[in-house]
Amino acid sequence: MSVAVSPLAPKTYPDMPAIDGVRIATAEAGVKYKGRTDLLTMVFDEGTTAAGVFTQSKCPSAPVELCRENLAGGEARILVVNSGNANAFTGKKGRATTSAVGEAAAAAVKADKSTVFMASTGVIGEPLPAERITGFLEGMAAKAAPGGWLEAARAIMTTDTYPKVATATVRLGEHDVVINGIAKGAGMIAPDMATMLSFVATDAPIAAPVLQDLLSRGTGKTFNAVTVDSDTSTSDTLMMFATGAAAKRGVTPINDLKDPRLAGFRRALNRILKNLALQIVRDGEGARKQLEITVTGAKSSRSAKKIAMSIANSPLVKTAVAGEDANWGRVVMAVGKAGEPAERDLLSIWFGDIRVAHEGERDPAYSEEETSAYMKKDEITLRVDLGLGRGKATVWTCDLTKEYVAINGDYRS
Amino acid sequence: MSVAVSPLAPKTYPDMPAIDGVRIATAEAGVKYKGRTDLLTMVFDEGTTAAGVFTQSKCPSAPVELCRENLAGGEARILVVNSGNANAFTGKKGRATTSAVGEAAAAAVKADKSTVFMASTGVIGEPLPAERITGFLEGMAAKAAPGGWLEAARAIMTTDTYPKVATATVRLGEHDVVINGIAKGAGMIAPDMATMLSFVATDAPIAAPVLQDLLSRGTGKTFNAVTVDSDTSTSDTLMMFATGAAAKRGVTPINDLKDPRLAGFRRALNRILKNLALQIVRDGEGARKQLEITVTGAKSSRSAKKIAMSIANSPLVKTAVAGEDANWGRVVMAVGKAGEPAERDLLSIWFGDIRVAHEGERDPAYSEEETSAYMKKDEITLRVDLGLGRGKATVWTCDLTKEYVAINGDYRS
């Protein structure tokens, strides 16, 4: 099992500013790992709004069920995240745990238990005793402090090879507000470590329904446009919290989606979501290359995205990229199997700027040598034009290497 | 790149009887490979009916288009199959080739060109000059002889590690008739070798519409119930030919699907289709284990099959089987992502006879040791009961090993 840091890891980390209204603490709870932090609490000031997007799995984890339930209230006072155990497929025991942790967390911040949010990542099917977490919460709530975002990102790692953070400062009317985000995972990064988690916070005063709309729309071209291995986790959770603390600095609250100040905020948020999503792809199991796939000329954007995902999830395309092979025959195969409108004889395909196929045939001008040189890069772009309409989509994935099989074929225990 | 014979290859081959009305010839045409046969012709007596099932790809190969067109006539006089080049994604050149080969083949057997069927398997996107094939056809038609089924299976191999044949003799009313079949491939077995091909013939006198119904219904639980890597080829072709020669021995023709003699014939045919389909799985890229997946208790059979295929195509389930890991957490994940009705807390999961999970939790009686011993077998069965209804389906796949990545990540040229 590979423990080396991904060759696609960021070279440097940004300075993560504190966010007014958010306090952070981490702890070594020993849920499963020893000698590292595995428990994170984020404590939010009163009035913090929440939004969330969760796994589409029909068998979601117990924490995902709790978050969905509490999101109805739209208010957040504390987030509790543990690594080492996903509390997924744990039946009634799983719900007993989320309930007990929820009560202890609520007591620790003296708030209603409907304002507690929770996420767990790690082994599936192993009961998670609430006691491993509850005893830490009061102390953590007391010592929670502004800052500590990189430490927060570290505490939620499972077999991630690097912590994932992103930040932006954005003008909201006359004032600056901050957006910070952290993430972990890469689809299903390692044996039973089945979770993509991401948490974003801002001090902007944004009403919960507006926040939910920003987040839901933001995921389509970011988190929902990446794939490592087509395997959707039982625990995927993306949450966003807006403390509203910037209101104290004179920022008037945003209660309406049509607020003109949202345009810049939305752009900055989407950049952060994309940044975090790409960091996950670049830490995909065994990944050595990032592959950006753009489909243009489709009947619709939905159709373009379905075809792009069919390419991104094809084991044959992904192994070809690992082998530095501009194997456009497999790209045609993946277009054909997507089940979406496509005309073989209108297809064109590019690797980088090199057009390798045109009008349903190999491009006569295509240079094997030039293409081979391009395929040695660690960031590959692939474009397919269908020649049918104006639908367009971009998705991201990584290559499929022997290390993926090694990491995931190692025995569970 | 592995060239060793699959550990799951059959230990012995059946004796393949001749089929009255079918004559076979193979040749070393040198389409791509040297020192081996790569061209097959099957010549059929007048009155032979044909049926076919083809790839669902939106970008099918030129030979698939030709077969679909000619199938409208329902009559077959010659089948031409080459390995080494798939004639897929070859644009107008590809259609010119199928047209020229079709004319030469028709001339060789002095029949109408609408009775010619064709299949090509090998590299995608490389033009296939008709001259590499046409010059051989007259000679092959002349020397074609009864028997030679194992040689036929060898001529259509690409990187298959063994030829795939099956036979059955079945009572039709008062008389015996024979069904023979050959197949090649395993989804997308090797770099650019993108084809699953299978051809079945019988001397039973069966009208084309009846034959088509038998074949179409037969594929659902056989060829359409296997997967190696979820990648659908541009060239998948399954064809069946009925020479009717048994009529000379007194078998009255079958023109009606309600003919009671069909029951036994259908059972024998379905056994052959399943046998060939499983031989393909067992020769899947890098395969070391066969995995049979049965889903019971689903809302419908369609729903059961979709869930079974979601499990069979999950890279994480397949790598776990390669690692001899009874990783039922990943099975839950794959059930959850299928998008079909499922209730986490009703799920039960068995590896072999060992129930590892029950009512949405780990089975308390589950023995890790016993399960580990079971997972060392080379044929693994997995059963998931959803507890919702009576829908049921079984599918077959192989494990995902490092050899799969090695075979498919090797450079194309």
Image (cartoon, coloured by chain):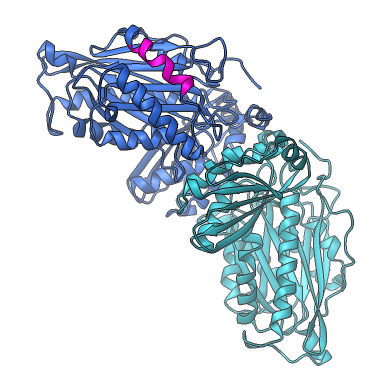
Chain colours: A cyan, B blue
Location of residue A247 with respect to A118 vertically, above or below: below
Tell whether position A346 is magenta.
Answer: no
Query: Compared with residue B116, is residue B163 higher up or lower down, i.e. above or below?
Result: above
Where does the C terminus of chain B fall, quadrant-wise? top right
In front of the other: B246 or B303: B246
Q: Quadrant of the N terminus of chain B?
A: top right
Question: Exactly how many numbered labels are in the figure?
Answer: 0
Q: Is residue A239 visible?
A: yes
Q: Of helix, strand and loop, which mostly describes the magenta segment?
A: helix
Residue B201, image quadrant: top left
Q: Residue shown at 11%/14% (left/top)?
A: B174
In the image: residue B2, left or right of residue B57: right
Which residue is nearer to you in this view: B55 or A20? B55
The reply to whether residue A89 is in sight is no
Q: Nearer the viewer, residue B141 or A211?
A: B141
Residue B42 on image: x %, y % = 33, 17
Q: Is residue B290 left or right of residue B167?
A: right
Q: Residue at x 81, y 40 (%)?
A: A3
- The residue segment tinted magenta is B131-141
Residue at point 70%, 69% (across, down): A270
Q: Is residue B69 left or right of residue B406?
A: left
Q: Position of residue B116 (x, y in %)?
A: 31, 26
Q: Position of residue A59 (x, y in %)?
A: 52, 54
Q: Does B272 sit left or right of B286 as displayed?
A: left
Name the spot of residue B373 as percent of width and height, x first: 58, 24
